[in-house]
Image: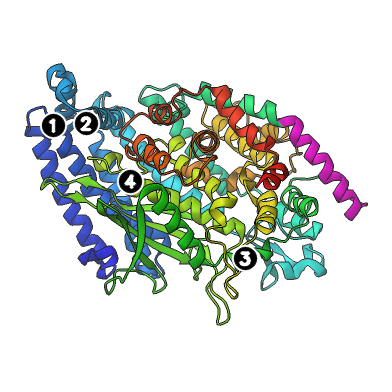
């Protein structure tokens, strides 16, 4: 069965696994309601969470990644059913009372360890944001709103990826071959951002982002429903509800962070836009005005011209095998951890090219498993991500339930003449996702509810982004960069060029200004309702104010903004996590990226707690200080000011 779960040897097994989980959860609810307040109360709640998550988390992955449609459909149904049960449990008054009795008992609470107290409070928070304090009629309304929001999220997400069609006769014949033909129509499934032909990019932008009335209606209903739910359970806005317990704590802090960062970036961004405009004028004198469809392409041209590099030169040095050896070596030196390939059992994996890795510590033994779903295949989403399939926890018998995760990438297959070769960007993504995996392996909490990456969103990206700094450090890269044919070591001057041109692409000022724009838009959409203007008018206003490039009439980029589903009111998280990762890198690892003492401190202060400790306290423990909003902004801006040429010369 999938992931070693016997029921999941066929799609119908999801129903069996789901029924078993629901039966177990019913028994645990009864047990929780009849147990006197104490440590056991929290343990039962965590068992309940684990029973449901073991099916829901696994199904969450299978519904998007399994090549068999029947498996995907069965997993989707399981997700929906478990989600509905969770919403009902979050408004179960008797279940909540059992937890409330514990939290009200000061003597018992003072006898519990900090992690147990925090987990109890987090479970209560789940009740409160679901409206447990409301009367029965309003509680039912909260459940219905949650279920409707879940459906709208799924529908909106599907809509963000659907292609748009246009009649062939509308586009000039000489650019039609760039799009997929379907009878008398052309399908436009993306922005073609890297295409060198200006007209192709312009056409793709205007057609792909043309407003869809149904998708617009879904977005408006989603935002209104989220706001209604937040206000129903006692919050001013959905953003206030979503930011409870995060590093930022409230929308006011996020707004301050984004405004200060935007101010720092505006001059730099405009300078870049001016350079791109000159470049466009040189290449296309008839139409030199810089437009949104030009930005990604000309920023790439500008970078290539400035550093005179071809990223393809580095691919032969970055075979997948070499990169995995590099990760293994880094983890061994920093954390005493090794990765070992294991042969999966029959039916355990969903595609024959999936690899199973055992994560083993030099003294603690087996820590968990990583399934590496790295290669492209038909119908597989083209995205790089980390999935928790099973969270770690201390079982009732005293044994530890090992965490299981999946890392999903979209790498090309090896060929007869060459192994899978990674571009510098792919290599960085591999390191990024492996950062999440290590967080899952080393966040060995007592409770599944806060294990590994189950922590506030604006902290969850810190370990993964920190790994990008390792991926872009010449000392780390030189340990594993080997030409796949000759075994030649990647020389400093070659790797140095790669660092100058490619490293920290995400922190490049142009990318940062885009991220600030997306985050600002997300905050407004999830702020005070009713919105003062339409979502498209808000997009236009925010784009021109924060990003600096003109809005294109009859486009609605927000309808392709898939992150509004998973990161509603939290899109700023990536920026804040990057700021923390930057501070940790500079203060703790820049001098010596293999420092074992720092690696152990990083594990002890940041990775080990999962979500069992307030995120800002973990950051304080690592940095030995409490960072301010200004510190976050300065960390991001100082990355842009780094003189890479000097750095490479020194190296």
- Judged by depth in the image, the label closer to the viewer, 4 or 2, is 4
Q: Kindly check if marks 1 and 3 are in contact, taking CB atoms under 8 A apart as contact.
A: no
Q: On residue 442, which mark appears?
A: 4
Q: Residue at x 46, y 52 (%)?
A: 433
Q: Is residue 276 left or right of residue 224?
A: right
The image quarter in which residue 495 lies: bottom right
Q: Kindly check if marks 4 and 2 are in contact, taking CB atoms under 8 A apart as contact.
A: no
Q: Is residue 492 visible?
A: yes
Q: Which residue is mark 2?
A: 116
Q: Tell which residue pokes out farthest to the bottom in this image.
A: 416
Colouring mode (rainbow / by chain / secondary structure / one colour): rainbow
Query: Where does the magenta region start and end?
Result: 266-287
Q: Which residue is mark 1?
A: 39
Q: Kindly check if marks 2 and 1 are in contact, taking CB atoms under 8 A apart as contact.
A: yes
Tag 4 or tag 1, which sits nearer the N-term?
1
302 or 183: nearer the viewer: 302
- Above or below residue 363? Residue 481 is below
Q: Is residue 528 visible?
A: no
Label 4 sits on a secondary structure element that is helix
Q: Residues within 10 Å of mark 3 (few under 14, many from 20)?
A: many
Label 1 sits on a secondary structure element that is helix
The image quarter in which residue 2 lies: bottom left
Q: Residue at x 60, y 28 (%)?
A: 633
Q: Which residue is mark 3?
A: 315
Tag 2 or tag 4, which sits nearer the N-term?
2
Tag 3 or tag 1, which sits nearer the N-term?
1
The image quarter in which residue 416 lies: bottom right
Label 2 sits on a secondary structure element that is helix
Q: Is residue 547 left or right of residue 32?
A: right
Spatial CA distance of label 3 from label 4 is 31 Å
Q: Tell which residue pokes out farthest to the front in this image.
A: 650
């Amino acid at each position: 069965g999938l992931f070693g779960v016997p029921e999941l040897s066929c799609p119908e097994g999801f129903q069996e696994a789901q029924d078993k989980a629901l039966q177990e959860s019913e028994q645990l609810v009864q047990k929780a309601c009849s147990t006197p307040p104490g440590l056991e109360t929290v343990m039962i709640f965590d068992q309940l969470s684990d029973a449901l998550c073991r099916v829901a988390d696994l199904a969450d992955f299978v519904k998007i990644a399994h090549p068999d449609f029947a498996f995907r459909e069965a997993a989707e149904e399981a997700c929906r059913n478990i989600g509905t049960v969770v919403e009902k449990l979050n408004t179960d008054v008797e279940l909540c009372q059992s937890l409330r009795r514990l939290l009200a008992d000061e003597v018992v609470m003072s006898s519990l360890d900090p992690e147990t107290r925090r987990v109890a409070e987090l479970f209560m928070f789940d009740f409160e944001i679901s409206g447990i304090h409301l009367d029965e009629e309003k509680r039912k309304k909260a459940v219905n709103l949650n279920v409707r929001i879940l459906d709208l999220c799924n529908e909106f997400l599907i809509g963000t990826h659907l292609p748009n069609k246009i009649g062939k006769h509308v586009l000039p014949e000489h650019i039609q071959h760039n799009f997929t033909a379907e009878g008398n129509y052309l399908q436009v499934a993306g922005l073609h951002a890297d295409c060198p032909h200006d007209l192709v990019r312009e056409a793709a932008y205007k057609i792909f982002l043309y407003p869809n009335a149904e998708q617009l209606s879904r977005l408006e209903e989603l935002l209104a429903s989220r706001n209604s739910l937040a206000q129903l359970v006692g919050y001013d806005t959905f953003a206030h509800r979503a930011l409870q317990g995060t590093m930022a704590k409230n929308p006011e802090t996020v707004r301050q962070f984004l405004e200060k960062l935007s101010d720092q970036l505006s001059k730099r961004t405009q300078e870049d836009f001016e350079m791109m405009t000159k470049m466009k004028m040189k290449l296309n004198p008839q139409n030199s005005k810089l437009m949104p469809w030009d930005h990604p392409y000309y920023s790439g041209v500008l970078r290539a011209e400035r550093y005179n590099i071809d990223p393809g030169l580095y691919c032969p040095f970055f075979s997948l095998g070499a990169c995995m050896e590099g990760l293994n070596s880094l983890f061994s030196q920093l954390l005493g951890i090794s990765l070992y390939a294991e042969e999966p059992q029959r039916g355990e994996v969903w595609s024959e090219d999936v690899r199973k890795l055992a994560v083993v510590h030099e003294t603690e033994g087996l820590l968990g498993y990583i399934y590496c779903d790295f290669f492209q295949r038909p119908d597989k989403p083209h995205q790089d991500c980390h999935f928790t399939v099973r969270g770690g926890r201390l079982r009732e018998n005293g044994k530890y339930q090992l965490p299981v995760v999946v890392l999903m990438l979209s790498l090309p297959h090896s060929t007869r003449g060459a192994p899978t070769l990674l571009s510098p960007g792919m290599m960085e993504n591999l390191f990024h996702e492996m950062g999440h995996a290590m967080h899952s392996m080393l966040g060995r909490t007592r409770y599944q509810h806060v294990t590994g990456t189950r922590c506030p969103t604006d902290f969850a990206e810190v370990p993964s982004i920190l790994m990008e700094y390792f991926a872009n450090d010449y000392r780390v890269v030189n340990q594993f960069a080997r030409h796949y044919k000759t075994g030649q070591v990647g020389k400093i001057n070659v790797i140095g060029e790669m660092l100058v041109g490619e490293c920290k692409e995400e922190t490049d000022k142009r990318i940062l200004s885009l991220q600030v724009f997306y985050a600002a838009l997300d905050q407004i959409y999830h702020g005070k309702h009713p919105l003062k203007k339409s979502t498209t008018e808000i997009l236009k206003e925010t784009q021109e104010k924060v990003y600096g490039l003109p809005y294109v009439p009859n486009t609605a980029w927000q309808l392709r903004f898939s992150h509004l589903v998973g990161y509603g009111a939290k899109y700023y998280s990536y920026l804040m996590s990057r700021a923390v990762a930057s501070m940790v890198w500079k203060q703790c690892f820049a001098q010596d990226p293999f420092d074992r003492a720092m690696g152990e401190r990083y594990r002890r202060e940041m990775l080990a707690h999962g979500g069992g400790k307030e995120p800002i306290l973990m950051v304080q423990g690592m940095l030995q200080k409490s960072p301010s909003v200004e510190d976050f902004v300065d960390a991001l801006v100082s990355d842009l000011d780094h003189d890479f040429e000097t750095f490479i010369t020194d190296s």
